[in-house]
Image (cartoon, rainbow, N blue to C red):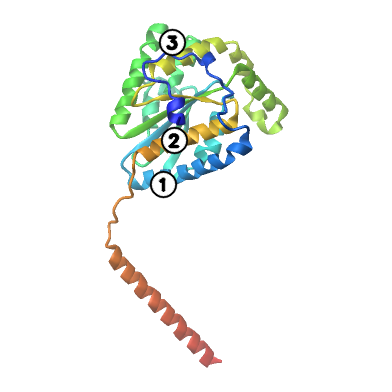
Amino acid sequence: MKYSEKFMVKPGSSIKLDKIDAAFKDKHEDQTSALGEIETFTQRLRELQYLLYAENKRSLLIVLQAMDAGGKDGTINHVLGNMNPQGAKVYGFKVPSAEEAAHDFLWRIHKAAPQHGQVSIFNRSHYEDVLISRVHNFVPKKVWSKRYDLINNFEKNLVESGTHILKFYLHISEDEQLRRFKQRIDDPARHWKISESDYKEREYWGDYTKAFEDALSKCSTVHAPWYVIPANHKWFRNLAVSQIVVETLEALQMEFPKPTVDINKVKEKYHKAEAEGKNGKIERESHRKKGK
């Protein structure tokens, strides 16, 4: 079964994250076993992104959500980082600025939506407004409970405008999160990632889980599906995400645009210039020898 089928949250279904094995790794025993497939998919991803950019008829939006230390940055670096930055941009959505907070919650998101030929990658997203805002009561339930429909309508509008949407929830266990926090403590190169809120937020694990389950269940649609990716093993996460993105782009059956010039005439000019260049080189060489 393709990962796009295996890990998709079926529209209309109700999901329970504790029923999904975050340590799932399919047929592979370890990273070494999966490395060949990962490299194949990431290379193919780069080719398809170039085709998307050249065709310039549609766009791709990739949304990444996870618990703290779930691997959003790692996914961007190891999988999506293979894209040409000329056609791909990463956006991180943290605490809204004063200007952003003065608008509706989707205003800052819509500005970052990709134009034709482009890929936008959201590291956190508009879903924060039904996650952290809900868990910490930044807005009352009567406000955040209406946002699911607003999000679905917003995403449908993007799709009807030519944007294809893939949403990935990187699923790690509570124990794996604690292990990754320890890595940050032990590795000086990761100290910058440590936040005072890391351990405090763990107290809300159950609340966040419920919030994610509702977001995944209410907002996985035919036009903008959610995928729950087992992410305890970083290498498997990379394999699954890259495969799903490749499958999605290949299904678009994109084509390079037709040339805007007469290729045969361009070839004639090239061969003429090439011949003149060779003749000029021969003539210059002859003069050089005579000069001796």
Up the image or down, 10 lies above or below 265; here it is above
Up the image or down, 198 lies above or below 80; here it is above
The answer to whether mark 3 and mark 2 are in CB contact below 8 A is no
Secondary structure beneath disc 1?
A: helix
Residue 196 visible somewhere in the drawing = no
Q: Earlier in the sequence, mark 1 or mark 2?
A: 1
Q: Position of 58 compared to 5: left or right? A: left
Up the image or down, 118 lies above or below 265; here it is above
x%, y% of residue 193? 62, 27
Secondary structure beneath disc 2?
A: helix
The answer to which of 92 and 227 lies nearer the viewer is: 227
Which mark is nearer the camera, 1 or 2? 2
From mark 3 to mark 2, how far is it between C-alphas?
Answer: 34 Å
Secondary structure beneath disc 3?
A: loop
Mark 2: which amino acid?
Val
Crowding near the residue tagged with mark 1, few <14, some 14–19, many ≥20 C-alpha atoms within 10 Å: some
x%, y% of residue 277? 42, 77
Mark 1: which amino acid?
Tyr
Q: Residue at x 44, y 22 (%)?
A: 98
Which mark is nearer the camera, 1 or 3? 1
Residue 25 visible somewhere in the drawing = yes
Q: Quadrant of residue 12?
A: top left
The answer to which of 19 and 57 lies nearer the viewer is: 19
Q: Earlier in the sequence, mark 1 or mark 3?
A: 1
Q: Earlier in the sequence, mark 3 or mark 2?
A: 3
Image quadrant in which the C terminus is located = bottom right
Q: Residue at x 53, y 90 (%)?
A: 289
In the picture, the disc for residue 50 is 1
Residue on which the image places disc 3? 139
